[in-house]
């Protein structure tokens, strides 16, 4: 399994647009590109951090070719809400002990 970790500096007042477009794009990537899902977190300083899991690095690297046409508009909304977006880590899994949700 492979994970990518991203950081997003979101412009003031654009947080809701960012979160909604991030979620929509993430759902599309899950549905059409084979990702295993993603989680979005927010640091105390307002920086957003997301990590996405993938079956392999190759699948992650080749993602984007199967998205429906309207995904470009969703990407543009998300990018416009940010002053920067970075992939800060590319990680191969060594061991896994995350437990399933128990709500």
Image (cartoon, rainbow, N blue to C red):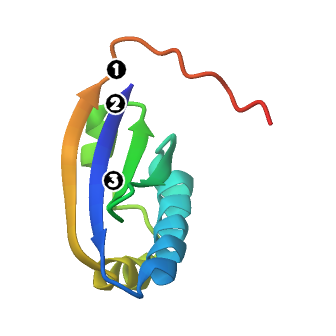
User: Where in the figure is residue 63, as x and y percent of width and height?
Assistant: 33, 53
> For the point 48% across and 47% down, which residue is it?
38
Q: Secondary structure at mark 2?
A: strand
Q: Are marks 2 and 1 in contact (CB under 8 Å)?
A: yes
The residue where tag 3 is placed is 63
| Residue 22: % across, % down | 46, 68
Q: Tell me which label, 2 or 1, sits earlier in the chain.
A: 2
**Would you name the residue on which mark 2 appears?**
2
- Where is 92 relative to 41, above or below? above
Q: In this rendering, does residue 69 appear at all?
A: no
Is residue 92 positioned above or below 67 on the image? Answer: above
The residue carrying pointer 3 sits among few (fewer than 14), some (14 to 19) or many (20 or more) residues within 10 Å by Cα, namely some
Please state, as top left, top right, bottom left or bottom right, where the C terminus lies in the image. top right
- Which residue position is annotated with label 1? 93
Q: Are marks 3 and 2 in contact (CB under 8 Å)?
A: no
The answer to whether residue 53 of the structure is visible from this angle is yes
- Tell me the distance, in whole angstroms, between the alpha carbons under discs 3 and 2: 13 Å
């Amino acid at each position: 399994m492979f994970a990518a970790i991203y950081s997003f500096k979101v412009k003031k007042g654009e947080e809701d647009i960012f979160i909604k477009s991030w979620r929509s794009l993430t759902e599309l990537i899950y549905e059409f590109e084979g990702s295993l899902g993603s989680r979005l977190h927010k640091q105390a300083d307002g920086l957003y951090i997301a990590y996405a899991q993938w079956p392999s690095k190759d699948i992650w690297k080749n993602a984007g070719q199967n998205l429906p046409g309207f995904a470009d508009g969703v990407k543009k909304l998300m990018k416009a809400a940010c002053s920067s977006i970075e992939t800060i880590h590319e990680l191969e899994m060594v061991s896994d002990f995350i437990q399933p949700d128990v709500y």
